[in-house]
Image: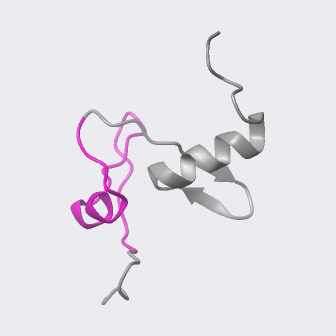
Amino acid sequence: MINPPGKFAAMVKIGEKGQIVIPKEARELLGVGPGDTVLVLCDREQGLAIPSPERTAAIYEAIFGAGRGEEE
């Protein structure tokens, strides 16, 4: 399977503890690595998604509003 530029799709297995490995190509595309935290979104109809760190900030802001979620 050849992925178009800027996109990636692959099948991964779920381990005994419910964990998945994000393939190297996907980690590189998102710019994430060991120790980074990612947001996992799940929708019964849409499926599972891991947005880029840049999109994660926008999603948090859309859900919680600017400045929310931070300790004051």
- Residue appearing at x 37%, y 68% in the figure: 11
Image: magenta residue range: 9-34
Is residue 37 shown in magenta?
no
Residue 66 in which image quadrant: top right
| Residue 34 visible in rendering | yes
On the rendered structure, is 8 left or right of 61? left
Asked whether 69 or 41 is in front, the reply is 69
In x, y percent, where is residue 12? 35, 61
In x, y percent, where is residue 72? 65, 9
- Residue appearing at x 55%, y 47% in the figure: 56
Residue 45 in which image quadrant: bottom right
- Residue appearing at x 41%, y 78% in the figure: 7
Quarter of the picture containing the N terminus is: bottom left
On the rendered structure, is 29 left or right of 52? left
- Residue appearing at x 66%, y 48% in the figure: 59
| Residue 50 visible in rendering | no
On the rendered structure, is 15 left or right of 52? left
- 8 above or below 22? below
- The secondary structure that most of the magenta stretch takes on is loop
In x, y percent, where is residue 64? 76, 34
Asked whether 12 or 31 is in front, the reply is 31
On the rendered structure, is 38 left or right of 21? right
Is residue 25 shown in magenta?
yes
